Image (cartoon, grey):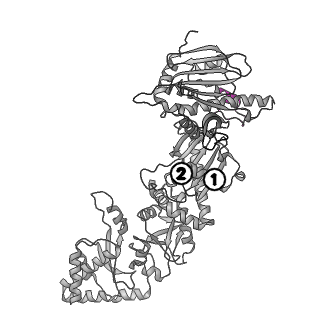
Amino acid sequence: MAKKQFKAESKRLLDLMIHSIYTHKEIFLRELISNASDAIDKLYLILTQKNTGVSREDFEIWIKVDKENRQLIISDNGIGMTKEELESNLGVIAKSGSLSFKKEHEQNEDIDIIGQFGVGFYSAFMVSSKVTVTSRAYGEDQAYQWESSGTDGYTITESDKSDCGTEIVLTIKQDTEDEKYDEFLQEYRIRNLVKRYSDYIRYPIKMNSEQQKLKEGTENEYETVIEEQILNSMVPLWRKNKGEIKDEDYQNFYQEKFYDFIKPLKVIHTNVEGVVSYNSLLFIPSKTPFNYYTKEYEKGLQLYSSGVLIMDKCPDLLPDYFSFVKGLVDSQDLSLNISREMLQHDRQLKAIATRLEKKIKSELVELLNKERDKYEEFFKNFGLQLKYGLYDKFGANKDTLKDLILFYSSTEKKPVALSEYVSRMKLDQKYIYYAAGASVERIDKLPQTELLKDKGYEILYFTDDVDEFAIQILHEFDGKEFKSVSGDDLGIEESKDNDEAIKEAGDNKELFDFMKETLDGKVSEVRLSQRLKSHPVCLTSGGGISIEMEKVLNAMPTDEKIKAEKVLEINASHPVLDTLKKAFVSDKEQVKKYTELLYNQALLIEGLPIEDPVAFSNAVCELIAR
């Protein structure tokens, strides 16, 4: 029979298919197996409608490797194709029989047609120098063979085949310097590809395999036997009823699929039906992956379409702040592009991502409320990511995350949620107070916390670099604003004792102006403190940048140095003020030395470096020697 030519547009598309559309050549096997599954689905539907008593167990897909002839053979006992269908489905690229069949039977829920675009078959030409398709349609007596070596056209001839179904023979290309094709003639490679991409095809994928077994009647003599093996699992764990699944089933699945030696902290298994339907099986790890807080970490969920793996990591299904979640989503409603390797950014994908986000949050809230120890363990590992999410995108996600954040409490001596803090606020308390520092121990000793602790106010301790930035974005929680213990104004009425101490201190404007001048721009103001009780001195800050934020920003690799607006506060009831006042009258040079000492002392309390440690040491020694 004379060779037929592809239509011009089909020829161009085939050339594009071979060289451009698919990123990974290995997916040709996924496409051909999916087509075989579709063919079986079609026949199964027809036979069940005729009440023939057929069951899914009557169908199978076979793979055979013929190394000698460089052939890889995929066959099925599905519906097969007539001569006309071979012509229309394989002779015209992007003409999909599966798509038209699905439209005709779209009300039937017992059928999943995977291939809908009519191009997956042609991925075979990426690895094949010749493709031969022998098919006999259900109910037909004559089989036909379609054969092509690529863009030069195809032939269709009569052929012999004893039963209905399709056999595809791929003649695998020879290796070149740039491309390796021999791997597709290796049994172990075929097994891996089936397991990765087609593990959950609902029909058994079989292959005969050589096995070494002990020869009967001998102790150490082995023989080679051929055994039939099923390569795929068929039924996905996520499609089973939850009541059928044990905890160890989830655990084993997670550890095998996501290469973790520790069982997951939380399993989230959902089956959603509606405008967009999908199954999801998500896991929250018990420990932080070793590279989680690095650029190398890649977020994303495995994405399946009707049990066929489309993407190993689909980043669009998870927001960055939930990037620690591992798992998969399986949906037959997604709009895929012709290669199935990339998703169209459509409303179905966005709808799934939105629902997953809400589900993950609700599960975390439940964990916080019902299994507090587990949640605190989770927060140790991934709380920093939630805080970054709170700060990211100018607080666009703050309403999602604010209920999930924990901070160490000065009164509870453990991490607490913002809602818990607010529920315990005193009647006269207007603000949520916080203090920032390098560690809980250092914050606990800060002089700025004295007054608030004396009043019995709870203080949240911020120990992560991102904390203050995130809280400034959040601004308030449940109508209560956040206020730093080192801020300009604590927003509380001072005690009578403190008021009297300040009055007794008199007018110190000249002294404080002199001290400010001495510090030469290092502070914006020197004033009496309304927050110190026993400590002589402290630094506070005005403006939008706190002292802790200054440290964080200046630790970044930039030439620009950020400075907080620092205020030096003196305790009105501490003897150091009397010493300063007396020296100001008799020896202003001594006031300069005292001022430098007090300022450096305040810097040390804040964990800030001293500009001249030698001068500071000499000044202390001089003071001791007096």
Q: Amino acid at mark 2?
A: Tyr
Residue 546 in view of the camera: no
Query: Is 506 located above or below residue 281 in the figure?
Result: below
Q: Position of residue 546 (x, y in %)?
A: 37, 68
Query: Is 599 located above or below residue 103 in the figure?
Result: below
For disc 2, the marked residue is 259
Q: Position of residue 44 (x, y in %)?
A: 73, 31
Give the label on residue 250, or none.
Answer: 1
Q: Position of residue 432 (x, y in %)?
A: 49, 71
Residue at 59% from the left image edge and 61% from the top image edge: 365
Badge 2 local density, few (<14 within 10 Å), some, or many (20+)? few
Q: Nearer the viewer, mark 2 or mark 1?
A: 2
Residue 346 among those drawn in magenta: no
Based on the displayed image, in which of its 4 quarters is residue 41 positioned?
top right
Question: 301 and 335: which one is in front?
Answer: 301
Q: Main secondary structure of the magenta part?
A: loop
Lateral position of residue 450 relative to residue 563, left or right: right
Q: Which residues are magenta?
A: 100-113
Local SS, label 1? helix
Residue 14 in view of the camera: yes
Badge 1 local density, few (<14 within 10 Å), some, or many (20+)? many
Q: Amino acid at mark 1?
A: Tyr
Question: 392 and 246: which one is in front?
Answer: 246
Based on the displayed image, in which of its 4 quarters is residue 417 positioned?
bottom right
